[in-house]
Image (spheres, rainbow, N blue to C red):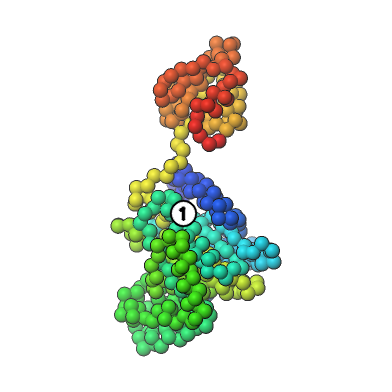
Amino acid sequence: MLQKPKGTYDIYGEKGKQIEYIESLLKSLMSKYNYDYIETPIFESSELFHRGVGETTDIVTKETYDFKDRGDRMMTLRPEGTAGVVRSFVENKMYGYASMPVKTWYFGPMFRYERPQSGRYRQFKQFGLEVFGSDDPMVDAEVISIAVNFYKILGLKGIKVNINSLGDKESRDNYREALIKHFEPVIDTYCEDCRERFKKNPLRILDCKIDHDKEEMKNAPTTIEYLNEESKKHFEAVKEHLEALDIDYIVNPSVVRGLDYYTHTVFEVEADIPEFGSQNVLCGGGRYNGLVEAVGGPNMSGVGFALGLERLLNALEAEKITLPYDNSLDVYVIPMSENEKSYAFGLLQALRMSGFKADIDYMNRKISGNFKQADRYNAKFVIIVGEEEINTRTLTVKNNNTKEEYKVSEELLINFFDDNIEEEH
Ligand code: ATP
Ligand code: MG
């Protein structure tokens, strides 16, 4: 039997409904925050990710799906969303818009060649957003608050927000020097990756999943100690704005995030749920003031985050949260025989066009089988269409819960359901 590729999964049934619900929630949330939807290609030139994610990151060195297309171009399935959005921002000259900042959001599949495990897949879905063109610390706080509020709306309780600041370029450079001094005497005892990171981007050593328990990791200098005045001021303002929004956070110096272009604020939201497992980082992001320029645009700042859908679903499951999506049908139409099918089918279309969720039998079930099917669909009402109903243009309508029966004339049928079904249509 043919099977799905390793590290992937199918979405169907209840999971499909969960994802539909989450997507619609995201849409309405993003419109309230006044963000625009953006969609970029699922594959881009490999060069974009080398520049946009960074040569020294795990994502680019170990995790990309690369292929040569039939025209001999090196292509990569996107491992994350930011690089493509930044490319689009630059290519479409959005930096020239009068209505700055440009606020965008995306939702779609990402691809990384990783060791599959719970919360870690080779194709997974991310929701993310990017804001371009503002240095205001309020934007940093807004972006963090969107992630947190999204989790809160869904009802998640066990979340922990870790924030940190890397500072501006000057602060980062000073910190880099300090890190080199700190790790130099012991770097030979570290893993091969760390020795490479030491040469290219020592900050990434702190993100190492192999050596993270070593002594020098724990007492490494922190970025906060190396912030210059300007950067301190920015970070203080971010914290103040978060407090204004009632967002609880922890300043955690170990959050450094790998991307080469991060400046100032970085943050991660962690699932703080017992027995959740080790893939507990639900979301990560921050400010990247050098990225737009690195991808060929003007010197313009950006702030964003990305959150993983699968870990979110795991967290919801761990907290036993069921999403409040509608799992019922408004009306199920039952023709008594072959003769009434066409009339019933017309009625069904009229109901659907008036905004009701409605269905009919396509399996030639007997009447009793039809009622069972109505129950499986959690139908609120059933319409029975027999010879007499058609002759008198009066339908038999049954409330499927109370079993009460009504005779409703054809022209008043839609009104009847408008009055009796409390739903948004
Ligand atoms: P990790 O340290 O767990 O590998 P990361 O730093 O690579 O995470 P990001 O690139 O910041 O993750 O992606 C943001 C979010 O996307 C993560 O917090 C996580 O929820 C999700 N994510 C990342 N990689 C995967 C994956 N392979 N499968 C499922 N979700 C993922
Ligand atoms: Mg990763």
Location of residue 221 (image quadrant): bottom left
Location of residue 158 (image quadrant): bottom left
- Image position of 319 (left or right of 310): left
Going by the numbered disc 1, the residue's amino acid type is: Phe
Given residues 291 and 53, the one toward you in this image is 291
Can residue 23 be seen in this snapshot?
Answer: no
User: Is disc 1 placed on a helix, strand or loop?
Assistant: helix
Q: Which residue is mark 1?
A: 150
Residue at left 61%, top 19%?
411
Given residues 234 and 364, the one toward you in this image is 234
Residue 98: x and y in percent read: 69, 63
Given residues 90 and 196, the one toward you in this image is 90
Asked if 124 appears above or below 410 in the picture, the reply is below
Asked if 377 appears above or below 63 in the picture, the reply is above
Q: Quadrant of the C terminus?
A: top right
Residue 53: x and y in percent read: 53, 70
Asked if 87 appears above or below 225 in the picture, the reply is above
| Count of marks placed on residues | 1
Residue at left 69%, top 66%?
96
Mark 1 sits near ligand 1, with its Cβ under 8 Å away? no
Can residue 392 be seen in this snapshot?
Answer: yes
Residue 114: x and y in percent read: 44, 63
Residue at left 40%, top 79%?
222
Mark 1 Cα shell of 10 Å, populated few (<14), some (14-19), many (≥20): some
Residue at left 49%, top 55%?
125
Asked if 265 appears above or below 357 in the picture, the reply is below
Residue 101: x and y in percent read: 62, 64
Given residues 323 and 275, the one toward you in this image is 323
